[in-house]
Amino acid sequence: MAISVFGKIPSREMYESVNEVVFGSKEPKMPDGLIIHTAGEGSDGFYVVDVWESREAFDAFMSDRIMPAIDELGFEADDSMTPKIIDVSTIIVNEEARV
């Protein structure tokens, strides 16, 4: 079952640093199981909102790619970074949407 993941990141700088380690400087390759990835500044911090094909795909990406990058960069993962996860029952995508 598809899931939505809502995660608060301590800063845009942390998000960009982790992405650099995970993907390098080239255009990021979509990880297996990722349907859509969004990220941006909110009124109270920087957020990531993703849709994944399954909880297993998300968990694998976190344990195999994200957590090692966080460790490599010396960032501390804390409880504020624990994402909220919901089961997705509907996804509607506008093929013309671009940012």
Image: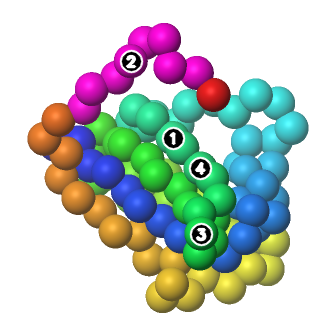
Q: Position of residue 43 (x, y in %)?
A: 59, 69
Give the crowd class for mark 4: few <14, some 14-19, many >=20 residues within 10 Å.
some
* Residue on which disc 2 sits: 94
Query: In front: 18, or 42?
Result: 42
Q: Work out which residue is located at the far right of the displayed protein and give it.
A: 25
Residue at the extreme front: 43
Q: Badge 4 is on which residue?
A: 39
Q: Which is nearer the eye, 26 or 16? A: 16
What kind of residue is marked 4?
Ala
- Residue depicted at 63% across the width and 53% down the height: 40
Asked if labels 1 and 4 touch by Cβ distance under 8 angstroms, the answer is: yes
Residues shaded magenta: 91-98
- The percent position of residue 70, horizontal first and vertical second, equals 69, 70
Residues at discs 1 and 3 in contact (Cβ within 8 Å) = no
Which residue corresponds to mark 1? 37
Magenta portion: prevailing SS class: loop
Residue that appears at 68% across and 85% down: 76
> Considering only order in the chain, which callout, 2 or 3, is on the residue closer to the N terminus?
3
Q: Nearer the viewer, mark 4 or mark 1?
A: 4
Disc on the earlier residue, 4 or 2: 4
**Residue type indicated by callout 2:** Asn
